Image (cartoon, rainbow, N blue to C red):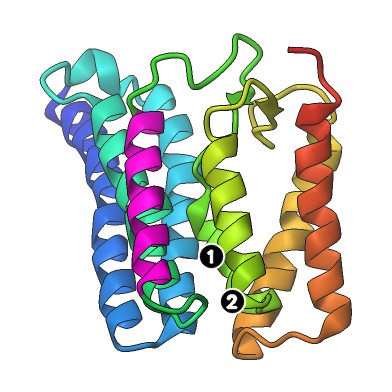
């Protein structure tokens, strides 16, 4: 192997670590109440998370650079982007009255931390077990749909409990079943989410309804699958 191969492999770790930088940008935006910017940063982090693994396998990063664990790095970045920053947004975004907002944020980070420590968070056929701590997505829906505080609190509690329930949740890329349909739904969701950001998280009832339908689809794929 040439130095170029090692440099290229390390660049993949840098790409993954860039998600942590995006998380910091998202947190700063959240503190300033710039929720659209926060979700934009979190969305960019999701894109990084979606491509870095494929690139890492193609460049044989694990074999070339055994000193650094790509899996650990990925978990660290995923926790701050999928759990910690969204927990702050839900706690301080005005969705829930205080101190209920703070309590919800604490529940999110604690259950998320336990979930990330679960060695069996994925099934052999690449489904997630339980709600896979997609709190960035949950926060996005709460900001778009703007449910009453009691309903927002109930949804947070339900998702926190669902983290530990024995049902399957589809990974739209890695799960073979209905992959083409799931990918199409993911693309449509991304377009609608981007439109929602352009509309300051107020996309109107038709777009909001379509986002809900897509969420129900992704939930239904896993629930309809045998354990």
The residue lying furthest to the top in this view is 124
Residue 188 image position (x, y, % from top left): 78, 61
Q: Residue at x 31, y 64 (%)?
A: 22
Query: Mark number for residue 143?
Result: 2
Secondary structure under tag 2 reads helix
- Front-most of residues 192 and 80: 80
The stretch in magenta equals 99-116
Q: Residue at x 85, y 70 (%)?
A: 209
| Marks 2 & 1, CB-CB < 8 Å contact | yes
User: Is any part of residue 141 visible from this angle?
Assistant: no
Residue at image x 41%, y 57%? Answer: 45
Relative vertical location of residue 5 with respect to residue 125 in this rendering, above or below: below
**Residue 101 within the segment the image draws in magenta:** yes
Quadrant (top left/top right/bottom left/bottom right) for the N terminus = top left
Q: Position of residue 103 (x, y in %)?
A: 36, 60
Mark 2 and mark 1: Cα distance apart in space: 6 Å
> Dividing the image into 4 quarters, which one contains the C terminus?
top right
Residue nearest the observer in this picture, 142 or 171: 142
């Amino acid at each position: 192997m040439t130095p170029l191969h090692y440099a290229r492999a390390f660049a993949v770790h840098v790409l993954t670590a860039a998600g942590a930088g995006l998380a910091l940008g998202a947190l700063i935006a959240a503190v300033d109440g710039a929720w659209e910017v926060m979700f934009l940063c979190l969305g960019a982090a999701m894109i990084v998370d979606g491509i870095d693994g494929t690139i890492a396998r193609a460049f044989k990063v694990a074999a070339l650079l055994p000193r650094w664990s790509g899996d650990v790095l990925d978990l660290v970045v995923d926790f701050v982007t999928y759990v910690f920053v969204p927990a702050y947004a839900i706690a301080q975004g005005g969705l829930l009255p205080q101190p209920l907002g703070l309590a919800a944020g604490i529940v999110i980070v604690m259950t998320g931390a336990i979930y990330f420590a679960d060695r069996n968070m994925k099934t052999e056929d690449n489904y997630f077990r339980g709600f896979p701590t997609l709190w960035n997505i949950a926060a996005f829906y709460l900001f778009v749909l703007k449910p009453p505080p009691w309903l927002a609190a109930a949804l947070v509690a339900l998702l926190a409990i669902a983290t530990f329930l024995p049902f399957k949740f589809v990974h739209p890329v890695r799960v073979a079943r209905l992959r083409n349909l799931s990918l199409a739904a993911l693309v449509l969701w991304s377009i609608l989410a981007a439109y929602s950001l352009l509309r300051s998280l107020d996309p109107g009832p038709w777009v909001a309804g379509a986002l809900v339908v897509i969420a129900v689809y992704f939930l239904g794929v896993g629930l309809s699958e045998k354990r």
